[in-house]
């Protein structure tokens, strides 16, 4: 059997980027032989094994044939006769379809090195269409390497458009899509992920509520917000919360109304993509309170307290910080370049005043149960009233 390094490790070494994870392909071996050598199979019908010591993935050289719609519709054909070239041919991009042998010799039958030089994300063959997730992968690689000057080849974009038009993308599960979306949002150019999907006609399948913004004329604004998020190293929850907003749709009269179409959109995106809870919550909070948080001085002490309670600033201080970060990214994308965010500082100050009110003196006065809660709220409100009056 021969073993080659493949995929990202070869690509990133040639790009001079750090290699974090190595994938291997094994030619000329059977599953039985792998087991005899101590490799552990990852699943019964998936020709991938884990190395007994390193835990790295070793896949038998294979060709894939699609047997149906969606991710379940795969059959793998592996045999000791499948060649390295056949295996590389069914991979997604030419820059991912290179192998390296034990001597460090690069095997590059489909022009991967040329495309690395030309900064092109180009599909290897029509077999690209066998896995619709690759549409998202290409956009993610575009987001990762945009800073190096990479773009999607025109024919690849057409192939992605065709896949979208065929309806294949709708068969992707939320779990697989979210994995790509979340990784793409954390790349150096998350806006390129969204723009690439939009330009290739696939955004309507992946994030239809975001695609709709492009028809409404506010799509570019979303791209600018994502750009700011990356520039300021924001965490995933902030990036997701910013992606799903639509300031154009906010009902300025009743921004916090839970029935607003703006919040319905955000809910729809949360349900479609099923991100982790903190992402979902932050997206909703930003949708609900961003407008209110622009003028916190106009709130009464009771309203200010209600806002802080809603954020649970006592137990979840990070959530208010992430909310304020999202508001700041939004402001920056609109051209307000202020490094300090006065409303943010005001709310932070209010949160620390509310947190400063402790329960011990009330316990000492004999308050218990519901009465204790009410007394605590009164004290906090009083403290906030003092804070608001302070010069
Ligand atoms: N849907 C997919 C997933 C993976 N691959 C192939 O399998 C390799 C390894 O996949 P993966 O580790 O997911 O991607 P990498 O290219 O290694 O990139 P990353 O740096 O994100 O790990 C890819 O390079 C590509 O050749 C593919 O063709 N189609
Ligand atoms: Mg990899």
Image: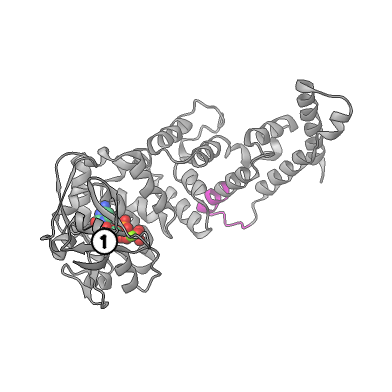
Q: Residue furthest left?
A: 81
Q: What's the residue at 31%, 65% (across, down)?
A: 150
Residue 367 screen position, x and y as percent: 84, 24
Q: Nearer the viewer, residue 84 or 186?
A: 84
Determine if the C-beta at disc 1 is less than 8 A from ligand 1: no
Q: What's the residue at 69%, 46% (across, down)?
A: 348
Residue 227 screen position, x and y as percent: 46, 56
Q: Is residue 165 magenta?
A: no
Q: What's the residue at 52%, 52% (across, down)?
A: 235
Residue 108 screen position, x and y as percent: 19, 71
Q: Is residue 332 magenta?
A: yes
Q: Is residue 123 left or right of residue 370?
A: left
Q: Look at the image and tell me whether residue 138 can be seen.
A: no
The number of discs equals 1
* Quarter occupied by the N terminus: bottom left
Q: Is residue 14 left or right of residue 255?
A: left
Indicate which quadrant contains ligand 2: bottom left
Q: Look at the image and tell me whether residue 9 can be seen.
A: yes
Q: Nearer the viewer, residue 1 or 134?
A: 1
Residue on which disc 1 sits: 37
Residue 254 screen position, x and y as percent: 56, 29
Q: Secondary structure at mark 1?
A: loop
Q: Is residue 232 left or right of residue 314?
A: left
Q: Is residue 2 above or below residue 344?
A: below
Give the magenta-colored segment's residue range. 327-339
Task: Say which quarter of the image contains residue 121.
Answer: bottom left
């Amino acid at each position: 059997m021969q073993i080659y390094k493949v995929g990202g490790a070869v690509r990133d070494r040639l790009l001079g980027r750090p290699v974090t994870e190595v994938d291997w392909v094994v030619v000329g071996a059977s599953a039985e032989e792998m087991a005899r050598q101590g490799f552990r199979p990852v699943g019964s019908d998936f020709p991938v094994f884990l190395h007994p010591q390193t835990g790295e993935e070793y896949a038998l050289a294979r060709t894939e044939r699609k047997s149906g719609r969606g991710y379940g519709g795969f059959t793998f054909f592996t045999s000791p006769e499948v060649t390295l070239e056949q295996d590389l041919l069914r991979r997604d991009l030419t820059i991912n379809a290179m192998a390296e042998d034990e001597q460090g010799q690069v095997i590059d039958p489909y022009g991967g090195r040329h495309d690395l030089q030309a900064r092109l994300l180009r599909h290897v063959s029509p077999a690209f269409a066998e896995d619709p997730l690759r549409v998202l992968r290409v956009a993610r690689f575009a987001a990762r390497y945009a800073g190096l000057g990479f773009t999607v080849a025109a024919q690849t974009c057409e192939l992605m458009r065709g896949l979208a038009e065929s309806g294949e993308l709708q068969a992707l599960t939320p779990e697989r899509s979210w994995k790509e979306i979340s990784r793409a949002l954390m790349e150096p150019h998350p806006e390129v992920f969204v723009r690439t999907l939009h330009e290739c006609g696939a955004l309507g399948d992946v994030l239809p509520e975001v695609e709709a913004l492009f028809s409404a004329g506010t799509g570019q604004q979303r791209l600018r917000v994502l750009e700011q998020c990356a520039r300021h190293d924001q965490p995933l929850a902030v990036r997701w919360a910013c992606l799903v907003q639509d300031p154009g749709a906010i009902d300025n009269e009743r921004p916090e109304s839970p029935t607003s179409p703006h919040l319905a959109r955000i809910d729809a995106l949360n349900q479609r993509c099923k991100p982790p809870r903190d992402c979902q919550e932050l997206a909703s909070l930003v949708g609900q309170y961003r407008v209110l948080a622009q003028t916190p001085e106009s709130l009464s002490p009771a309203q200010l307290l209600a806002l802080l309670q809603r954020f649970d600033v006592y137990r979840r201080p990070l959530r208010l910080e992430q909310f304020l970060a999202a508001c700041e990214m939004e402001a920056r994308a609109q051209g307000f370049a202020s490094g300090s965010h006065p409303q943010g500082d005001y709310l932070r100050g209010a949160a620390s005043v509310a947190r400063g009110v402790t329960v011990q003196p009330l316990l000492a006065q004999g308050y218990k149960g519901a009465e204790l809660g009410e007394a605590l709220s009164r004290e906090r409100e009083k403290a906030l009233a003092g804070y608001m009056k302070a010069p």
